[in-house]
Amino acid sequence: MTLDDLVSVGKLGNSNHAPEGYLRFQPNWNFHSYFFDIKDVFLVFTDHRVRYVTIEDVRVNKFFWIKIKEDDVVQEVIDSRSVQYRIPESMVKNLRFKNDENFLNGMKVIADDQLLGVVTDSFYNGAHYTLIVTQDDEKEFMIPNVDRYILSIDKQKKIITAHNIQELTDL
């Protein structure tokens, strides 16, 4: 396998305010959250060294945080400050096929115990995910998937609980 066979989907680096043992992951424009289903990835350093590592855990809050199983690599990433996170192109194609629909699609969005609509699409805008919600009258509005607007996402019940939403629905 060569570097040409790998797709860069983000960068690891800044560990300021990171949970213990985690590195901050900054996704590229082509990133999809289902890429985290791939546990064995390649890290490409600025000096062109490549390390094959296993992702032990991923945390998502305001940012993505990645925990690498190989402890010795963590300090290398911190010292480098900017390491490409790459996955094999063949795996990207397989995942896109399996995960064509976003897992948030079809989830109900509620606020103040009222149904606002259903998620019909989402996209990553370079800073965060944005949900497109369609109301019963076919009107659409967007909700940034950030703490200011999203309280919780219950995958089992397929319900997203939102707040501070009035300013978005009035647009």
Image (spheres, rainbow, N blue to C red):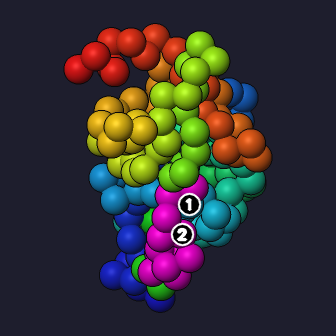
Residue type for callout 2: Asn
Of the pair 30 and 171, the residue shown nearer to us:
171
User: Is residue 33 toward the left or the right of residue 152 in the image?
Assistant: left
The picture places residue 81, in percent across and down from the top left corner, at: 42, 39
Circle 1 residues within 10 Å: few <14, some 14–19, many ≥20:
some
Of the pair 146 and 14, the residue shown nearer to us:
146
Position of residue 147 relative to residue 153, above or below, is above
Of the pair 138 and 155, the residue shown nearer to us:
138
Residue beneath the point at 60% across and 33% down: 160
Residue beneath the point at 64% across and 18% down: 113
The picture places residue 50, in percent across and down from the top left corner, at: 49, 68
Labelled disc at residue 51: none
* Residue 97 falls inside the magenta stretch: yes
Q: Which residue is mark 2?
A: 99
* Residue 125 falls inside the magenta stretch: no
Residue type for callout 1: Tyr
| Residue farthest to the left, as pictured | 171
Q: Which residue is mark 1?
A: 34
SS majority, magenta? helix
The picture places residue 109, in percent across and down from the top left corner, at: 54, 33
The picture places residue 3, in percent across and down from the top left corner, at: 38, 78
Circle 2 residues within 10 Å: few <14, some 14–19, many ≥20:
some
Position of residue 20 relative to residue 39, above or below, is above
Q: Which residues are magenta?
A: 91-103
